[in-house]
Amino acid sequence: MIEMKNVTKKYPNGVVATNGISVNIKQGEFVYVVGPSGAGKSTFIKLMYREEKPTSGEITVNGIDLGTLKNKKVPFLRRQLGIVFQDFKLLPRLNVYENVAFALEVIEEEPKEIRRRVMEVLDLVGLKHKARMFPNELSGGEQQRVSIARSIVNVPKVVIADEPTGNLDPETSWDIMNLFEEINARGTTIVMATHNREIVNTIRRRVIAIEGGMIVRDEHGGDYGYEI
Amino acid sequence: MKFNTIKRHFRESFKSLGRNSWMTIASVSAVTVTLILVGVFALIMMNLNKAASDLENDVEIKVLIDETADETAEKALLAKIEKLPEVAEMTYSTKEEELTDLVKDFGDDFKLFEQSNPLRNVVYVKASDPQQTVNLAKKIDKFDFTYDVKYGEGKVEKLFSVLNISRNVGLVLILGLLFTAIFLISNTIRITIIARRDEIEIMKLVGASNSFVRIPFVLEGMWLGVLGSIIPIAVVITLYHNVYKNIAPRLQGEFIQLLEFSPLVYQVSGLLLLIGVLIGVWGSFMSVRKFLKI
């Protein structure tokens, strides 16, 4: 599903964010990416949806070689992925329904089909009754559920999440995690960068630990492993 | 692109004008102010240019034909002048006709000269390009049987140099004004778009292609241009209507005339609309481009 070979990313300011990372994530896996701040987690995640280009090495996502992917074709890669951010990244001027529908408008889906699919995912995340509200009228947890609904409305094979519970209180975080588990149970691959020890230690899945731009640990059913 | 998508782009461009109403007002005012300046200045410049051409066209060469020339020599001279490539038109007038004109202009006292006419046969020549008058006059002067060639030596050269300078100054001013307009308008549009860079980023992250993001913005820029040119067009029309009504009658019979109301005002209006739309579209296009690289 996602394959990296010797991927190095060096930023123009000289910072080496990932230093020869190789990893293979299979279809249907649930992967935590952990590590201290500034270790290269975010870069690792951004490389997958081509917000950053690797300096060297190979990345293949869903059969697409990101090394030879033209800038023009990047939207087609992103349409096969669902991306969830720590700060939700909802369009403030659009209501809940429109925010989710946007991901389908972009791929020029039929209006009828858009309506059906949007209501379906809003039902899944439990926000059908708030479809007409705007992001600033929702709680953090609700906003994150909207952004998750947006990420899966395309039925992507992979959902990539960069600290999706980073801005949420513990209880809401658990709701969000349940949602991710449910999505994963349907066969969708999930890659999630997180700082949440409790979640990683409770919902045991594959854990990739990154430090100093390198993978220092990669175990199935591992724990968070860092003392604060 | 599907029809639904095109409809969406138009809908979005209208919606966003309303949602960013303050930005819309700012951009439209910037367009309005600069286009009023451009419009008024264009009216002035085009009229000045017309006046300059009127002055230039009034310049002609008077060729006095030597008395010793008999009829065949005169004909030969006329044929030679006519063959010159710079000549636009020429009128021949005998010395009797010249005297009649003189009497008409200065009174019956000149009738005295009817007994022995001191004047010479004359041919009036106009150059196709008035700026060539001096050259042409010098060429004609070299021909046989020309007694004298007059074109207002000294004055004509001065007139032409003044007109050329004022034309160039006008051109520079108009270019400067246009440049300022482009800068001002596209800058305002850029600010409105910078305020929405997050929006562009999110669109790109959910997989929108560049053109999908760009088209509504570009359409919006176009509407800004159209909205911004309404008031300037109204100003140009009313202003010139009044100016023409008041000044044109006083210039009757003069050799300098105002440009007619009808084609000029519509040409300038069309120009303003075109500038507004082009700058709006271009400004949006360039400003969005910067944020598409995600």
Image (spheres, rainbow, N blue to C red):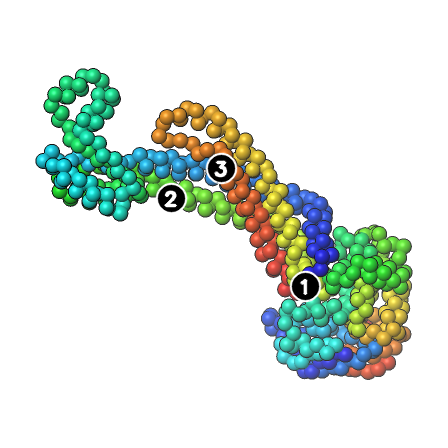
The residue to which callout 3 is attached is B263
Is disc 3 in the same subunit as disc 2?
Answer: yes
Q: Mark 2 points at which residue?
A: B168
- Give the residue drawn at x 15%, y 28%: B119
Quickly name the residue at label 1.
B209
Q: Can residue B193 be seen in this view?
A: no
If the image is split into quadrants, where does the N terminus of chain B sit? bottom right
* For marks 3 and 1 on the same chain, the one whose residue lies earlier in the sequence: 1
Q: Are marks 3 and 1 in contact (CB under 8 Å)?
A: no
Q: In 3D space, how far apart are the residues under numbered discs 2 and 1 (Cα atoms)?
A: 46 Å
**Amino acid type, label 2:** Asn
Q: A228 or B203, which lies in front?
A: B203
Question: What is the quadrant of the C terminus of chain B in the image?
Answer: bottom right
What residue is drawn where x is 63% and y is 69%? Answer: A71
Q: What element carries label 2?
A: helix
Pointer 3 chain: B
Name the spot of residue B135 as percent of width and height, x first: 23, 44
